[in-house]
Amino acid sequence: MTMFGWAETGGGTIFPRLIARELAERGHAVQVVYAAQEPLSGAGPYATRAHDDGGVRLLAIHNRPTPFLDDRAPARELHDPEPVRLVDEAVRSFRPDLVHFHNFLGLSAGIAAAVRARGVASCCSLHNFWALCPTLYLQLPALEVCAGVAADGANCLACTRAEIPGTHYVARAERIRAALVENVGLCLPGSAAVRDTLRAHGYPDAWMRVLPLQNPRAERLHAEVGRQRAAGVATPLRFGFLGSVLPIKGVHLLVGAAQALRGECEVHVFGDGPRDYLDAMRRLDTRRRVRFHGAFDAATLPRAVAAFDVGVVPSVCLDHSPQVIGEMQAAGVPVLGARIGGIPEYVQPGAGELFAPGDMAALAIAMQRLLDAPQRVVDWQRRLRPPPSFAGYVDELLSIYQELLAGRPLA
């Protein structure tokens, strides 16, 4: 497997780590090559560090030119010779049956050709829009969704501030698409929304199969909180947010909407973020309705999600496969979600509601309806279904691996 980071937070790192550990626990030999974010002191460029975690063999690549985004060097994102060499060497020595790419960020698209040249089957799960967008999220500075690289690529220069011709970003998008489609056997988008976005940028339908993500943390929350949680709401009604407190996650919409509500309610925000954004959110909370609880972890998550009646997922970005929705629903918490990205596919039908993305007034109206008629929340709670199993997801993944190994046509 290839990843960006190993122990870091963020769904694009957490989810493949869970897969790697589950496969190792089932007796499979698993190696992960990952782009490490932290520097390796005293070592040179592209220094490597081999280690082990829970039976997963790990190879970290440190001291790359940039610790995170390499958005000003599109040529290096296409082919960075040293990570390509290191991945090629790892494949040669480990001799995997299959490679599952979970990220190319920090490693370059060139690793796909290196794996194919070794005759190894492969698939990929794209946890962000790196293939389409040098800053990952198809998000403009004003928090509007970007339609992708313009014909002259000049729009990318506004985000990256690179001093290169915009046409370099046009070439980046076209050559990454060619590298992935030609060298990777199958793409597994976590939502139809991601598939449709890729399709709009020229990726072929036959190369993609939607595989909704499942989450073992949701299963634990159902066992510890949701299973024994009786339908009912608190007085005053409690709304809650879980996750990174970032502008693209739309926390400002939730805080702003809370100021417009009539009647008593509470808004709980669990998660950390940049200090300037958190300070702005506190200033926006003029009615002091929002409680900022700070960071949470796996140990404190059950207590956090039990602290509210309705979850709010107000993202303004094209969220791929928002696992927080499944976690809240598993804990007996129905969700108000923005109608954007994969969010509508993860909110259970008849047990939650969608609102227009980026529309603070629409969110306030949806919240007010629940304040005026809290029985709706109780009805939603009663309709919530238990989460699908993560083991079942991995079973399906292994079935896809077998198809790829057998070289059978993929539907």
Image (cartoon, helix red, strand yellow):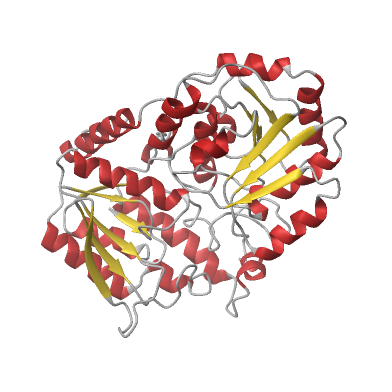
**Can you give x and y, in whole percent of width and height, for residue 98 in the image?**
20, 47
Q: Residue at x 22, y 64 (%)?
A: 51
Task: Judge from the rendering whether residue 350 lies leftward or rightward of residue 25; answer left or right.
Answer: right
**Can you give x and y, in whole percent of width and height, for residue 327 in the image?**
50, 34
Q: Is residue 227 visible?
A: yes
Based on the displayed image, in which of its 4 quarters is residue 298 positioned? Answer: top left
Task: Judge from the rendering whether residue 63 lies leftward or rightward of residue 68; answer left or right.
Answer: left
Compared to 81, does 267 lie above or below?
above
Q: Residue at x 60, y 16 (%)?
A: 231
**Can you give x and y, in whole percent of width and height, for residue 241 in the image?**
63, 41
Q: In front: 61, or 242?
A: 242
Q: Is residue 185 visible?
A: no
Compared to 61, does 312 lie above or below?
above
**Can you give x and y, in whole percent of width and height, for residue 136 in the image?**
53, 58
Q: Residue at x 49, y 51 (%)?
A: 128
Q: How many marks?
A: 0
Q: In front: 330, or 291?
A: 291
Task: Judge from the rendering whether residue 329 lies leftward or rightward of residue 50; answer left or right.
Answer: right
Q: Residue at x 56, y 35 (%)?
A: 305
Compared to 209, does 7 lie above or below?
below
Q: In front: 326, or 331?
A: 331
- In which quadrant will I find the C terminus? top left
Q: In front: 282, or 360?
A: 282
